[in-house]
Amino acid sequence: MRVAEEWGACKQHFWLRGRRPERLVEFDEKIGMWNVFGYPEALTILNDPRTFSSDLTRLFAADDDGTMARLNDGNLLQMDGQDHRNLRRLVSHVFTPKVVADLEPRIAKITHELLDAVADRDEFDLVGDLAYPLPVIVIAELLGVPASDRDLFRQWVDQLFASKARFWEGDTDLGATAEAEGLGDLQAMLDYFGEHAAERRRQPREDLLSKLVHAEVDGERLTDNQVVNFANLLLVAGHITTTLLLGNAVLALDLHPDQAKAVRADRSKVPGVIEETVRILSPFPTVARSTTVDTEIGGQRVPADQMLMVWVGAANRDERQFADPDVFDPTRDPNPHLGFGRGVHFCLGAPLARLEGRVALDILLDRFPSLRTVPGNPPVFMPTPEMIGARTLPVRTT
Ligand code: HEM
């Protein structure tokens, strides 16, 4: 599936335009890090967390006054080894497949309510009216914070990514950037969860935050700081990505009317559409690592203490792994894409994202027999390379 030039608002996403990387592993002089675009190379990195650490703060430790260490305590994404295993075991104990599966009726109800609000319109914004609010409401309800605070969440997350966008433009002083800009909003978010967590310690409820605060596995408990950072990670990781997934699935079907017709006729194909969308339009196309020793990737020597960007979005179109990688084929089986990562950091929320995607897409297909994009009113795409998908996606219903 080749997509138009405007999809490449970010020059990094060359693969969306059907281009292959010139080199599978390359050093980006401007940003001072390595890009990895190939599938086997990405797999080697994700499956070897000793050589390829998730803890990037080690690279900036000299500039840190303790702030980064505090912010990353409880952030699974940035942890390695036994600390990561312990925390992941503890949170998996609370965020179980059953907790997720039980959400199905609630996800369906929220989807219907959101669509009721636009049912009499010829056009609506698939992102603003459904794909954004749905996962935010779900994750907020799951955590036990008011879903009505979602404008606040959006503001915080937007700020967080605005400061990251500057990094991609070459402002690589990560420590200073975090301190000077992102931290203000991040701190507001952390304070918010801190207050909610403290309240749950005093008075537990039937929500994830209460379970996290009281969780105990083999005598281990989460500290307040870990609960707050993990809740924060769930909120950020748990909504934007799923928003993009739903928008991308609708776009993929819009670009492929034959596939859309087939899936409308046979809804058992919906999970395949979701999976193939994560492969071909990976919402979260990059994961970061740092080398702990001198090593070699794809025949390139890479010294210790280097930062790596593993472009899983590009790896998902590597023809050495996927036949006809640019073809959107929801029947692809197996579909070993890396869109949810791989190995010890495999996405903890993948079952929830898949469930939300499946339920919402199914209901959309039920309620709108001819849902299409709007000629002359194209989608607006996310401006940061860390995300692939629409910020606004006008659709027409007739
Ligand atoms: C990890 C993608 C939805 C929570 C990851 C990773 C990827 C990813 C690629 C691996 C990062 C790495 O290896 O460094 C996605 C995509 C999603 C999605 C594409 C939606 C389409 C969610 C949801 C949640 C979530 C809904 C939570 C409710 C997490 C967490 C981790 C993670 C906690 C860290 C796991 C660890 O480090 O052990 N995700 N994610 N994600 N994701 Fe997701």
Image (cartoon, rainbow, N blue to C red):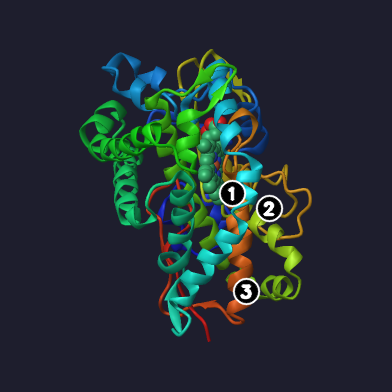
Query: Which secondary structure, mark 2?
Result: loop
The numbered dot on residue 365 is 3
Quadrant position of the N terminus in the picture: bottom right
Which one is in front in this view, the residue at disc 1 or the one at disc 3?
1
Q: Which residue corresponds to the image point at 62% horizontal and 57% vertical from the top-left?
A: 104
The amino acid beneath tag 1 is Leu
Q: Determine if the C-beta at disc 1 is less than 8 A from ligand 1.
A: yes
Spatial separation of the CA atoms under disc 1 and disc 2: 26 Å
Position of 134 with respect to 263 (left or right) is left
- Residue 226 in view of the camera: yes
Identity of the amino acid at label 2?
Pro
**Location of residue 183 (image quadrant):** top left
Query: Which percent across, then down, holds residue 86?
Result: 56, 21
* Secondary element type, mark 3: helix
**Residue at the spot 64% in from the left edge and 30% down from the top edge:** 343
Task: From the image, tell me which residue sits under label 2.
Answer: 325
